[in-house]
Amino acid sequence: MRAVVGLGSNLQQPERQLRQALDALRAIAEEGVVKASSLYRSPPMGPQDQPDYINAVAVIETVLEPLELLDQLQQIEQQQGRERKRHWGERTLDLDLLLYGDQSIDHPRLQVPHPGITERSFVLLPMQEVLGDMQEIPGQGELGQWVERCNCDEIERVVE
Ligand code: ROI
């Protein structure tokens, strides 16, 4: 199955955190990371007294079931010493399962598509880069429509 994972960090050298997490994703996915977006920098959504975030999106090919994949993602977060200081606060590494094939999943531990996708420019723009405007977000229409509607002024691509 093709799964789309969102990555975010604003502590402990965020760019390094994301590169390390991409390596870990390569290791768990059968075909590795099929495609990774550029890195993007944006101001925090939530409390403003925290550092800017670095975000990216990765597409992986996996035989893991959604909850198994979620376990693996949480394990990677833990391995990278996930610190989460407060609700909507700074964190070392956040991995979100954004899409799993074209499935809609409503489970106490997991909602897919991730409910934040459509209102978060830091998810929409990297998704658009790797999946294109025509990508369907199950139950929500096409990705391109949401990108048009989003406030994408404050997010910038990290030049490497
Ligand atoms: N804000 C930005 N810009 N990027 C994130 O990844 C992010 N993640 C979060 C909250 C705290 C909501 N804010 C964020 O979990």
Image: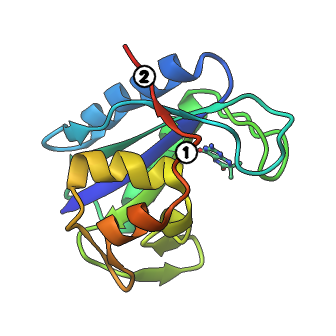
Query: Residue 102's x, y, as percent?
Result: 25, 76
> Which residue type does callout 1 highlight?
Asp
Q: Nearer the viewer, residue 157 or 4?
A: 157
Nearest the viewer among 99 and 70 is 99
Regarding residue 71, the answer to whether it shows in the image is no
Whether ligand 1 has any atom under 8 Å from the Cβ at mark 2 is answered as no
Residue designated by label 1: 153
Looking at the image, which residue is at 70% across and 36% down?
Answer: 91
**In which quadrant of the rendered image does the C terminus lie?**
top left
Seen at 67% across and 38% down, the residue is: 43
Residue at 66% from the left image edge and 30% from the top image edge: 10
Query: Is residue 95 at all visible to an observer of this figure?
Result: yes
As drawn, the label of residue 20 is 2
Above-or-below relation of 19 to 57 = above
Mark number for residue 105? none
The disc, 1 or 2, on the residue closer to the chain's N-terminal end is 2
